[in-house]
Image (cartoon, rainbow, N blue to C red):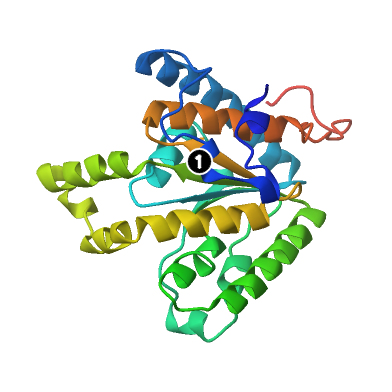
């Protein structure tokens, strides 16, 4: 079974409980072996990214969603460690600015979509507008349903115009999050990472899990699939994600563009 098959959410039948956060089945047994495997595959990812950029035909979007400490930043650092920054961009989404709030909620998202030949990684995304907003009670059920429909239409338009979309939910357990938050409190070098607001979200853990399950089930489509990646193991998480991305990139049958060299000199003086 391929990684995209094993970790695919499964559409309307999706149940978060079917994807254990600590699962490492099918992966190398040791952390070191998983890290070495990820490094080797990251080199292939770098090569395919180079061809994607040179060809300037396809656009590639990676959406990373997950609770605090699930590893969005760590995934970007590890999986894309060998990638050329020239053809890659990371876009983080925080609370909308005044200018963004004055427009529709997808405006700021459309503005930063990948260009031809570019890989863009969303650290959080437009899904915040149907997740946090619903858990916090800022939108009602009817508005959430409208936005889910709009997001499905938006993503279909993107894929029909040349964008590959890969959506990844970093599935961390409640206990693993507690340990990582505690580490931020205990280690002075990680104090800067700690945000007291994370504890407020932690109190709403059941509501967040229920909402994630609902939203993913409603937006896991063939044109914009969701993958549920176990995130309790950092090395396992990275290895799974790099494999999922490579499976999608290989399907694009990338090739360097052909150039007419007939008028070129044979040797540079």
Please identify the quadrant where the N terminus is shown. Answer: top right
233 or 267: nearer the viewer? 233
**Residue 200 rendering spot, x and y as whole percentages:** 27, 64
Percent coordinates x, y for residue 196 in the rendering? 21, 62
Residue shown at 49% from the left, 26% from the top: 239
* Horizontal side, residue 200 vs residue 39: left or right: left
Q: Residue furthest bottom?
A: 102
Q: Residue at x 66, y 32 (%)?
A: 4
Query: In the image shown, does 113 or 221 lie closer to the viewer?
Result: 221
* Figure label count: 1
Residue 152's image quarter?
bottom right
46 and 126: which one is in front?
126
- Density class for disc 1 (Cα within 10 Å; few <14, some 14-19, many ≥20) is few
Residue 238 location in percent, x, y?
Answer: 46, 31
Compared with residue 110, is residue 23 higher up or lower down, i.e. above or below? above
Q: Is residue 144 visible?
A: yes
Q: Quadrant of residue 115?
A: bottom right
Q: Decide: is 101 above or below 252.
A: below
x and y, in percent, of residue 11 in the image = 69, 48
Q: Is residue 143 above or below residue 244?
A: below
Regarding residue 124, the answer to whether it shows in the image is: no
Q: Quadrant of the C terminus?
A: top right
Instruction: For mark 1, give the secondary structure.
Output: helix
Q: Is residue 225 left or right of residue 133?
A: right
**Which residue is under mark 1?**
17
Horizontally, residue 21 falls left or right of residue 43, namely: left
């Amino acid at each position: 079974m391929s990684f995209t098959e094993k970790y695919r959410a499964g559409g309307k039948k999706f149940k978060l409980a079917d994807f254990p956060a600590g699962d490492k089945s099918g992966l190398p047994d040791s952390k070191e072996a998983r890290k070495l495997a990820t490094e080797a595959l990251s080199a292939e990812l770098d090569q395919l990214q180079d061809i994607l950029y040179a060809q300037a035909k396809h656009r590639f979007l990676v959406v990373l969603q997950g609770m605090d400490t699930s590893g969005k930043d760590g995934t970007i650092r590890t999986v894309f460690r060998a990638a050329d920054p020239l053809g890659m961009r990371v876009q983080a989404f925080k609370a909308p600015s005044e200018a963004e709030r004055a427009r529709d909620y997808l405006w700021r998202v459309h503005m930063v979509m990948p260009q031809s030949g570019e890989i863009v990684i969303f650290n959080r995304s437009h899904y915040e507008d149907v997740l946090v907003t619903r858990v916090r009670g800022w939108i009602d059920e009817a508005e959430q349903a409208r936005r889910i429909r709009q997001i499905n239409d938006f993503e279909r338009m993107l894929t029909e115009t040349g964008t590959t979309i890969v959506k990844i939910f970093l599935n961390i357990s409640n206990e693993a999050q507690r340990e990582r938050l505690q580490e931020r409190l205990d280690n002075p070098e990680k104090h800067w990472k700690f945000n007291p607001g994370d504890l407020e979200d932690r109190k709403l853990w059941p509501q967040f899990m229920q909402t994630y399950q609902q939203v993913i089930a409603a937006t896991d489509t063939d044109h914009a699939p969701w993958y549920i990646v176990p995130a309790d193991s950092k090395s396992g998480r990275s290895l799974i994600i790099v494999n999922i991305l490579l499976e999608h990139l290989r399907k694009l049958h990338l090739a360097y563009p052909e150039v007419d060299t007939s008028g070129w000199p044979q040797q540079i003086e």
